Amino acid sequence: MQTDNEKYNETVQPNTAFLNELKTKLPEFFTKEGSFDLDKFRNQLKDKNINELSEGYQLDFIGKDYARRQAGEMPTTVIVPDEKQNQGEGKNSKNLFFTGDNLEVLRHLQNNYQNKIDVIYIDPPYNTGSDGFVYPDSFEYSDEKLKDMFGLDDDQVERLKSIQGKSNHSAWLTFIYPRLILAKKILSDSGVIFVSIDDNEVSNLKDTMDEIYGESSYLSTLIWDRNHSAQAGIFKVYHEYILVYAKKSNLITTPKSANHERFEAGALKKVDDRHPLNEFTFPKGTRFDAPDGTELTGSWGGAEQVKIVSGRLISDHGRLKDDVTLAAGFTQIKQMHDYFDGKDVVDTRGQKVVEFYLNSTGKVRVIKERSVETPATVQKFGTQGAASEALAHLFKSSVPYFSSPKPVKMLETIVNWFSKPTSTILDFFAGSSTTADAIMQLNAKDGGHRKFIMVQLPEKTYHINKNGKEVPTKGGKAAYDAGFRSIDQISRERIRRAAKKIREDNELTLPEYFDGSFKHYRVVKPVKQTLENIEDFDPNNTNLFTNMVDGFSSQSLEVAGDATGEDTILTTWLAKDGYSFDANVEEIKFGNYTAHQVENNRLYLINEGWGADQTRELLNQLGTHQLNVQSVVIFGYSFNVAELRELENGLKQLDSKVTLIKRY
């Protein structure tokens, strides 16, 4: 009998090692059978792909090249912080909420969230003809530009533009395609994406996901029995689909089974003859469910006394920063040692121990897994109607604001399958923020630190009629009458109300570090006047006649939030440069000029007012190592040519290399 390895070795070819390496990096170019799709690879290398009559199976639609181009474009918007929210109730939150076009948000997140999202769930428009979906792009490029970009003739340009404002298959695919490409880039290597859809586009979505993520990355198509009797021809449809794909399927482990129950139990007992004092060393990296920087010292507890023998019990992003040895009346001390030696741990009842960890009190917690012997049954997550009623109840409204929200239990379950306690979960079609609600519910149950990122377009609940009056949209009257002028306002309020209810329902068991808030950002395009000022700007002018920074304040951009232009530019640049939205930003004074230093790495000069005195002070601090940065980033519109040259020449003369980055 041959071993598995021996059997495998008989199939190895000269290019097997290369193909295996290629498959880990580019799984989307491999078929389900494991062979490399060379034609698909060639097509992706092309900058034009208009031949829809080539032999072989491939996904083609009007607008595909345009969609591919959109996926490669840089953002043309700025990120405006909602200072009222971010310095108020959301000040200490790690959760994020973006109001704006999700394509633009995804473009921004490419820089500071690449490969960092663990789970993505989206519920995009289904293109039913009645869900309000129309392709939003107005093709702002001229016909000549479109011809040049994509190699089109006049007829092909007209065909491309024919999908504007339409809800046909090509329009829907052109809309969803670039968003799925960008979503893949920010998904972690072991990440999973769930996409809800119905019969209208499920086959097109499957083909699209196969092309972008790869056939081998397909995990499953889940069927949700929504128990909703919508008529479809001569049949009534009771279900929807959720397509599930991995970033790299070879890194995916079996999800937590619905046939197992997880629970926590204390692992400390009073020290006595039956439970003598024991010492146990928890290695660096052990899960420690406490806010970053939390440290316990000395000893603590009552009857269950614990004391530190050696090391430091300090949290570093939910993990032990150092090895630490504790002394206490630990039960199952032998099994705990065995567990960290990589062996299975089973308690006296035969329950398998899934994980040991420390919580913020220093108490050891044990997560066990209990097998359920009864056969598996279909999980009932609740109907769409019930989810809508529950949401209405949360808002104390007799009329639902949303007709088709997803059940919290469904989102809670699928997030739990593939998330860790410290995972980041993204939903860029947030809707009513069911995903955020589910994540908070899950954290409340297992003490996790999962973080959410919600993105929602500010779709209005009204339109302006010919008389200039606001009229509620179809289906938007209840929300409009309640004071909500856009969908994103409802989304954020749902998070607040859900968090409040979770606190009330879990008053005695909720961890101190429970995060029931969010930081809020609006992603918007600069107004016409600011764009005109940018276009007219002459860097060789000695005098600056227009303060360009003010054009990026929330007031100038005509959005709420109390952000200065400097706040907006700095927030946008931090994301561009790969910093998190809670990066440590320190104000540095050069006379009466305020600069911003980020993580001892970069210095940002944004406002006007920089002169020769500030340059001399900066060079002095850099030369004497009072200030240590690798680069200085300036907002070019705030510097005239003389100030810029003086700063540039001064930095070049420094012994330590400091790069000057000019941005316009």
Image (spheres, grey):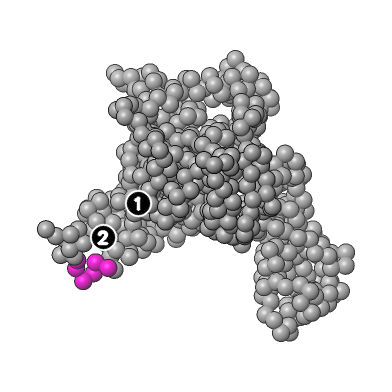
Q: On the image, numbered disc 1 is attached to which residue?
A: 249
Q: Is residue 448 magenta?
A: no
Residue 106 visible in the displayed image: no
Q: Residues within 10 Å of mark 1 (few under 14, many from 20)?
A: many
* Res 36 label: 2
Q: Which residues are magenta?
A: 12-17
Q: Quadrant of the C terminus?
A: bottom right
* Res 588 label: none
Q: Determine whether 658 is above or below 526 in the image.
A: below
Q: Secondary structure at mark 1?
A: helix
Instruction: Please tell me which residue is depicted at 54% across the width and 46% down the height of the picture.
Output: 276
Instruction: Please tell me which residue is depicted at 31% across the width and 57% down the height of the picture.
Output: 29
Q: Determine whether 272 is above or below 198 in the image.
A: below
Q: Amino acid at mark 1?
A: Ser
Earlier residue among tags 2 and 1: 2
The residue nearer to you, when weighing 506 against 608, is 506
Q: Secondary structure at mark 2?
A: loop
Q: Is residue 22 left or right of residue 496?
A: left
Q: Amino acid at mark 2?
A: Phe
Q: Is the magenta region chiefly helix, strand or loop?
A: loop
The residue nearer to you, when weighing 398 against 3, is 3
